[in-house]
Image (cartoon, rainbow, N blue to C red):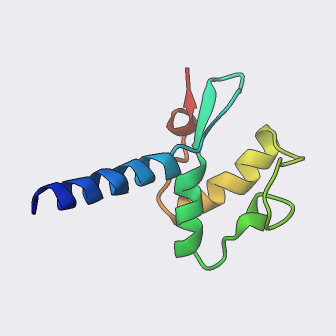
C-alpha cells in the first residue's frame, strides 16, 4: 500500500504535465514548416522580463496574430532567439 500511493501520485503528475505541454502549432512556410512549441514559449515568458503575451499577440488574452508572416516572424522571433540562444538559422525553425 505504501508503494501504491506514491506511484498513483506520480502517474497523476505525469498525466497532468503531458496534457499541459501539448500546445504545438505547425505554421506552414515555403521553405519548410515551422513547428512552434507554444507552451515552451509561455514558460520562457515567465523567465524573460521584457517578454509578455503582447510580444506576439495583440492582447494578453492571446488569440490569432494578425500580422503573422515571414517578415513579422523574422522581425519578432530572431532578436529574441539571439538573446536566449534559440535557433537563428533557417534550418533551426524550418523543417522540410
Residue 72 percent location from the top left of the image = 80, 48
Residue 72 higher or lower than 46, as above or below: above
User: At x 54% / y 41%, what residue is drawn?
Assistant: 89
**Residue that appears at 55% across and 47% down:** 88
User: In the rendered view, does 91 fall on the left or right side of 80?
Assistant: left
- Does residue 69 appear left or right of residue 93 in this picture? right
Q: Quadrant of the N terminus?
A: bottom left
Q: Residue at x 52, y 32 (%)?
A: 91
Figure quadrant of residue 95: top right
Q: Name above or below for residue 83 compared with residue 91.
A: below
Pick the residue in front: 5 or 72: 5
Q: Is residue 11 left or right of residue 7?
A: right
- Furthest-front residue in this view: 1
Hey, which residue is sitting farthest right in the picture?
Answer: 66
Residue 56 appears left or right of 84: right
Residue 33 at x, y percent in the picture: 63, 27
Q: Residue furthest left?
A: 2
Quadrant assignment for the C terminus: top right
Q: 67 or 14: which is nearer to us?
A: 14
Quadrant for residue 90, please give it: top right
Percent position of residue 45, x then y: 59, 68
Image x and y of residue 63, in percent: 81, 52
Q: Residue at x 86, y 61 (%)?
A: 58
The count of marks equals: 0
Amino acid at each position: 500500500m505504501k508503494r501504491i500511493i506514491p506511484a498513483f501520485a506520480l502517474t497523476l503528475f505525469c498525466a497532468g504535465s503531458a496534457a499541459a505541454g501539448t500546445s504545438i502549432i505547425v505554421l506552414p512556410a515555403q521553405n519548410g514548416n515551422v513547428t512552434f512549441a507554444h507552451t515552451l514559449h509561455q514558460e520562457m515568458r515567465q523567465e524573460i522580463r521584457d517578454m509578455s503575451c503582447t510580444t506576439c499577440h495583440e492582447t494578453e488574452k492571446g488569440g490569432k496574430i494578425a500580422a503573422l508572416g515571414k517578415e513579422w516572424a523574422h522581425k519578432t522571433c530572431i532578436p529574441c532567439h539571439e538573446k536566449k540562444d534559440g535557433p537563428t538559422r533557417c534550418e533551426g525553425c524550418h523543417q522540410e
